[in-house]
C-alpha cells in the first residue's frame, strides 16, 4: 500500500484594503533582500510604515486591482496594478515598484498557480504565456 500525503495548494483571490498590512510586510522583506545586494538603496522601505504607505497608495490609484496568493491562510505574494491612460499603450495595467512581492521561498517553488475563481474580467485572469496557459514557470 502506498500512502500519498495530500499537500495544500495555494489559493488566489482579489486583493482588498484589509490585505495592505500583510502586503506591506512582504514588500519590506523584498526590499531588504534587494538592499543586501544593493546597499545604497534606502533603508526606509524596510520599515513597516513606509512600505504600508506605498502599498496603500498603489491600491488607492484609480481603477487599481490586484490579487493575493495564500498558502494555508498565509499571504505568500501579491500583485497590484492600475491602468494608465495613453494611446501608445492601449488597454493596460501598470505594476509599479510597490505593486508586487512574494516570499523568497515561493520564488523557488515550481508550482502551478492559476487565478481561477476571481472572475474572467479581472486582468490577472488573462492568459499570459505564449502556449496559452496561465501557470507559473519554474525559474531558468
Image (cartoon, rainbow, N blue to C red):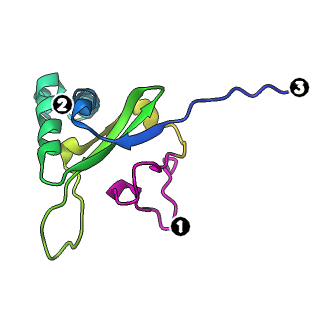
Of helix, strand and loop, which one carries label 1? Answer: loop
Q: Which residue is mark 1?
A: 131
Q: In front of the other: label 3 or label 2?
A: 3
Q: Residue furthest right?
A: 1
1 or 2: tag closer to the N-terminus: 2
Quadrant housing the N terminus: top right
Res 27 seen here? no
| Crowd rating for badge 3 (residues with CA inside 10 Å; few <14, some 14–19, many 20+) | few
Number of numbered tags placed on the structure image: 3
| Crowd rating for badge 2 (residues with CA inside 10 Å; few <14, some 14–19, many 20+) | few
Q: Is residue 115 left or right of residue 123?
A: right
Q: What is the magenta segment's predominant secondary structure? A: loop
In percent of width and height, residue 93 lies at 24, 59
Q: Which residue is mark 2?
A: 39
Task: Look at 57% across and 30% down and name the residue there.
Answer: 8
In percent of width and height, residue 95 lies at 23, 52
Of helix, strand and loop, which one carries label 2? Answer: loop
Q: Is residue 95 left or right of residue 113?
A: left
Q: Is residue 28 magenta?
A: no
In percent of width and height, residue 29 lies at 28, 27
Q: In front of the other: label 1 or label 2?
A: 1
Q: Which residue is mark 3?
A: 1
3D distance between C-alphas at marks 1 and 2? 39 Å
Give the residues in magenta: 113-140
Res 53 seen here? yes
Task: Look at 18% across and 26% down and name the residue there.
Answer: 46
| Crowd rating for badge 1 (residues with CA inside 10 Å; few <14, some 14–19, many 20+) | few
3D distance between C-alphas at marks 3 and 1? 38 Å
In percent of width and height, residue 137 lies at 50, 51
Of helix, strand and loop, which one carries label 3? Answer: loop
Amino acid at each position: 500500500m502506498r500512502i500519498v500525503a495530500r499537500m495544500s495548494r495555494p489559493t488566489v483571490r482579489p486583493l482588498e484594503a484589509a490585505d495592505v498590512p500583510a502586503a506591506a510586510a512582504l514588500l519590506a522583506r523584498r526590499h531588504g533582500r534587494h538592499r543586501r545586494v544593493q546597499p545604497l538603496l534606502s533603508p526606509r522601505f524596510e520599515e513597516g510604515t513606509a512600505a504600508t504607505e506605498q502599498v496603500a497608495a498603489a491600491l488607492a490609484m484609480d481603477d487599481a486591482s490586484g490579487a493575493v496568493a495564500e498558502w494555508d491562510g498565509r499571504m505568500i505574494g501579491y500583485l497590484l496594478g492600475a491602468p494608465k491612460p495613453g494611446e501608445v499603450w492601449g488597454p493596460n495595467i501598470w505594476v509599479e515598484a510597490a505593486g508586487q512581492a512574494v516570499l523568497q521561498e515561493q520564488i523557488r517553488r515550481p508550482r502551478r498557480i492559476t487565478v481561477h475563481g476571481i472572475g474572467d474580467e479581472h486582468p490577472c485572469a488573462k492568459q499570459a504565456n505564449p502556449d496559452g496557459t496561465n501557470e507559473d514557470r519554474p525559474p531558468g
